Image: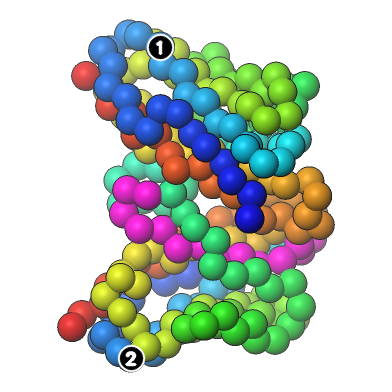
Amino acid sequence: GAVVSQHPSRVICKSGTSVKIECRSLDFQATTMFWYRQFPKQSLMLMATSNEGSKATYEQGVEKDKFLINHASLTLSTLTVTSAHPEDSSFYICSARDPRLDYNEQFFGPGTRLTVL
Amino acid sequence: GQNIDQPTEMTATEGAIVQINCTYQTSGFNGLFWYQQHAGEAPTFLSYNVLDGLEEKGRFSSFLSRSKGYSYLLLKELQMKDSASYLCAAGDSNYQLIWGAGTKLIIKP
């Protein structure tokens, strides 16, 4: 199956700083990637859909100026949490669709645990 | 609107069988997925149904009825390692996955 990597796996930062999370599709070209956030004991919450070469589509209630998404190549999407605050501490997970498949399976990265002090 | 419903939590005994139900409503339909998620980890793919009927894969089986907007995940010979959340997701016509809130499965010895 398709492989998606995510880096870093864990990050601790100070309040007010920015953090960049990378999501890479390793053995396929992903025209569409998705960014999710998950708080403890809660389900996945889709934050945005990232399309290569165009602006990301953000879900209602997600601040696009705070969560910057860049999908500059077919194998890399980045999520930057700007001016992070303790309430941004969460598990961030990316996923990608393989356009060679005719169904919607999403392949998930291992996730990034962000802790903002 | 688009909606996925599944039970919040279920408890079963090691060695037994458990069925996790999911009902869905989507704009268009492009298949029904089940994912497993252990605490602190990303979801992993379990099964995909696009046609009516039962798909069997080892101890896990998944069923779909498109006319009823209904699916279930059947886990047999439960093991302690099966304790996890099970996420139901339906694909819509825009290749988005509409996610359920997940069912936390607790396995007791």
Above or below — where is A42 with respect to A10?
Answer: below
Q: Residues within 10 Å of mark 2 (few under 14, many from 20)?
A: few
Give how far across and how far down residue B26 sits, in percent: 70, 61
- B80 lies left or right of B64: left
**Secondary structure category for the residue under label 2:** loop
> Residue at position x 34%, y 65% from top?
B84
Residue type of the residue flagged with mark 1: Ser
Q: Is residue B61 magenta?
A: no
The residue stretch that appears in magenta? B28-41
Asked whether the residues under the numbered discs 1 and 2 touch, taking CB atoms below 8 Å apart as contact, a structural biologist would say no
- Residue A18 is tagged as 1
Residue at image position (37%, 88%) is: B77
Residue B94 picture location, percent across and down: 78, 48
Seen in the picture, residue B45 relative to A66 is either above or below; the reply is below
Position of residue B50 in the picture relative to residue A17 (left or right): right
Image-quadrant location for residue B102: bottom left
Which subunit holds the residue at mark 1?
A
Q: Residue at x 31, y 79 (%)?
A: B79
Q: Return the chain for callout 2.
A: B
Q: Which residue is at the far front? A: A27
Q: Are marks 1 and 2 on the same chain?
A: no
Q: Identify the residue position indicated by label 2 in the image.
A: B16
Q: Farthest residue toward the left?
A: B109
- Picture residue at 40% right of the left edge, 67% below the top: B103
Verify whether residue B34 appears in magenta: yes
Quadrant of the image containing the C terminus of chain A = top left
